[in-house]
Amino acid sequence: MERPIMKDPIFLAQKSAPASAEDLPVAKDLLDTLIAHKDGCVGMAANMIGVARRVIVFDNDGSYMVMLNPEIVKASGSYEAEEGCLSLTGVRRTKRYRSIKVRYQNEAMQLRLKTFTGFPAQIIQHEIDHCNGILI
């Protein structure tokens, strides 16, 4: 089910709690909301739909991916990027990494470790920032 986009910076600046299997319906709603906004959005975190849990969804080079409790465990190749966000107005500059290794749980709650590069890596970093209460 598509949900409204949260725009309250006070709520968005709070750290999200760890996700559990009980949050899988949130992941589904988050994915539905991302797909509804696919013309102007490539990734979302659960707090963007008003749920303070560590769940992100994103376009991974043409297919959607869900991560619960994502954590960057390695990063390399820093660069400056300009990013926008559905929850915030305007575009802001931020530091990103070209390559990241992420530890996360999939929708079966299995622990995974995967390296991402390029634009998917940038999207993941933006969404993990949301989980950490960091507003760019």
Image (tube, rainbow, N blue to C red):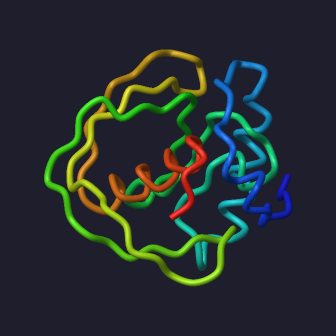
Q: Nearer the viewer, residue 51 or 57?
A: 51
Instruction: In the rendered view, tell whether residue 92 sits above or below residue 112.
Output: below
Q: Is residue 25 left or right of residue 133?
A: right
Q: Nearer the viewer, residue 83 or 44?
A: 83
Where is residue 19, by image quadrant?
top right
Q: Residue at x 71, y 55 (%)?
A: 48
Q: How many marks?
A: 0
Where is residue 115, by image quadrant?
top left
Q: Residue at x 70, y 34 (%)?
A: 53
Q: Is residue 36 left or right of residue 105?
A: right
Q: Seen from this angle, which residue lies furthest left?
A: 77
Q: Seen from this angle, which residue lies furthest top?
A: 110
Q: Residue at x 19, y 57 (%)?
A: 78
Instruction: In the rendered view, tell whether residue 12 sits above or below residue 41.
Output: above
Q: Seen from this angle, which residue lies furthest bottom?
A: 90
Where is residue 25, by image quadrant?
top right
Return the x and y of residue 44 as percentages of the image width and height.
Answer: 61, 55
Q: Nearer the viewer, residue 48 or 118?
A: 48
Return the x and y of residue 29 as percentages of the image width and height.
Answer: 78, 47
Return the x and y of residue 34 as percentages of the image width and height.
Answer: 66, 60
Q: Nearer the viewer, residue 67 or 79?
A: 79
Q: Is residue 63 left or right of residue 13?
A: left
Q: Residue at x 58, y 17 (%)?
A: 109
Return the x and y of residue 121 as percentages of the image width and height.
Answer: 33, 52
Instruction: In the rendered view, tell whether residue 79 sits above or below residue 115.
Output: below
